[in-house]
Image (cartoon, coloured by chain):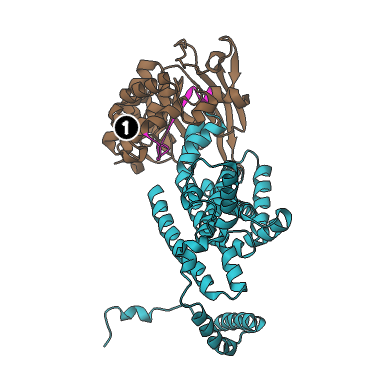
Chain colours: A brown, B cyan
Amino acid sequence: MSRQPTSILLPRDADLIQVTGLHKTYPGGQEVLKGVDLAFRPGEFVAILGLSGAGKSTFLRCLNRLVEPTSGRILVPGMVVDRPADAVVDIVRVSGPELQRWRRRVGMVFQQFNLAKRLSVIDNVLSGSLGYAHPMLSSLRMFSDQEQARALRNLDRVGLLPLAYQRADAISGGQQQRVAIARALMQCPAMILGDEPVASLDPKLSLSILELMRNICREDNITVLVCLHVLELAKRYADRVIGFAGGQVVFDGPPDKLDDLSIRRIYQAKTEELRGFSV
Amino acid sequence: MRGATDQYLDLPRPPRSTGKRLVVTLSVLAVLAWAFLGTQFNPAELVAGLPKMADMAKQSWPPDWGRLFDPADYHLPEELTWQQTLLPGPLTQDQQDIRDAWWSNTWPQTILGGTIQTIQMAIAGTALAALFSFPLGFLAARNTSPHPSVYFGVKVVVNVLRSIPDFAVGLVLISAIGLGPFTGVSALAFATTTVLVKLFSEAIENIDQGVVEAIQATGANRFQVYSFAVVPQVMADFISFVIYRFEANIRAATVLGLIGAGGIGLLMNADFRTFQYQQAAVSVLVLIVLVLIVDFASARLRRMVQ
């Protein structure tokens, strides 16, 4: 019946995910990703920088196949999708239940939070366990006691236990993003993707949300990939920064290696133009 | 004197296209003339008919309120006490037959019985339509349909069927399954389903796709996505559409009664045909009160669900 999800224990020194030659051309001919090669380790906190349209968002969505890559490979260890530990699975080629098994291991948080506004906070958190839950009962919004308890624990973790039975549209933006993070935690994820998760929040809330995400990354050994606009936030929180420009990776390294030249390459601008933007 | 803003009047303006205006005006006039001529518009006839109308109004006054309030007009069976007929209770087989005959034959032909039957027709027809249109709405919405061919198929069929007026459906069904309230319910269910599928599928197409994406990203299957991302966003609209259609169906059920599908419309028709205007007036007034009450209740209910 209901399968109780557990976290996967991945060796820290092996890659969680290997992306090679990833291309994406949208119908209409717009080439957004022009061959991306990247690999991520378990427990890495990675910030992705770049202008609007540089391909950051498309890259994240290719990883959980909300966007279909045109070509390329996304390799993950078999155990993440319940295959034998020594198997290697290409996410670009899976479909149906196997794709759902991958997606349930990849949490995602969005700029606009994307909660179901008319549902309660706890129901929104519970929706994170849909990939594990009984397909019929969960469609009727019925979850086992263990799942409900797990949802409450995850809500407590993001500091919102008292708001569990409020409607999701009755709480503030920062709180909604915390609910979205609790929803992602319900997935027992191997990786969390953040698509501009703090772009709709004020600076103080942005710090607290990124703080929360980094703590989760450290404590649960979850790979976190976030697209950010603000360079300073990337420098402050990330273990590793990746710069996208024109659909290609133009920088990949620790934040202290980010010099004027690489910043200019990421933002395709002269240093003077960026002065005053806390670069 | 020139005001402070008058200088703006001196700015160059686009030339007026008098030619275009003339063409538009003439075309509108031509269409209007065409429509009025085609329908043999004749105000004189209306004026000439006024005395007849006054006469009819005089004949229907005062309304024959006895039809509504006089127990004799309900033709309760003489073999039973009124309690035995109207209230549930133990009866012999013969008594039971008499009671059943009264309920199924006499009661629907009384004003109160006919009115209640009209309400029952509207409720049953709307409920059936809600039941059918809920799943069909998902199939007919671009973003939830399992396949483009299903979406196009359902949409085209429903659009074609919706173009059939409900009383035409009623006429077809009367010749197929005969006179009676069940025919009315079937016709209402059919016509209402086609309307609700359109409204509901459009509501589904207008939802915030972000939530759908978020639930898909958790590894949810199709039905889980419906339940968590689509239904919460459209349920209030759906209930509101159903209540609104119920309101419209009270009126539609009356019209269906006129063509023989039971309820108060049937009584009204019979009274008009036999020139019993004082009795017909009672049906008309009862219907007006009923529609007012349902309009009011429906507006309140719809505000509550939003």
| Magenta-span inclusion, residue B184 | no
Q: Residue B196 at what x, y percent from top left?
A: 56, 51
- Disc 1 on helix, strand or loop? helix
Say which chain tag 1 marks: A
Q: In this view, does B150 lie to the left or right of A273?
A: right
Q: Is residue A279 visible?
A: no
For residue B14, above or below residue B137: below
Mark 1, residue position? A232
Please tell me which residue is depicted at 31% across the width and 35% down the height of the picture: A174
Q: Residue A33 at what x, y percent from top left?
A: 55, 34
Please tell me which residue is depicted at 54% across the width and 27% down the height of the picture: A136
- Furthest toward the right, the residue is B176
Q: Can residue A134 be seen in this view?
A: yes
B260 and A248: which one is in front? B260
Instruction: State which region is magenta.
Output: A102-120
**Quadrant location of the N terminus of chain B?**
bottom left
Helix, strand or loop: magenta stretch: loop
For residue B266, above or below residue A124: below
A121 and B259: which one is in front? B259
Please tell me which residue is depicted at 56% across the width and 74% down the height of the picture: B276
Q: Residue B117 at what x, y percent from top left?
A: 54, 55
Q: Residue A242 at what x, y percent from top left?
A: 44, 28
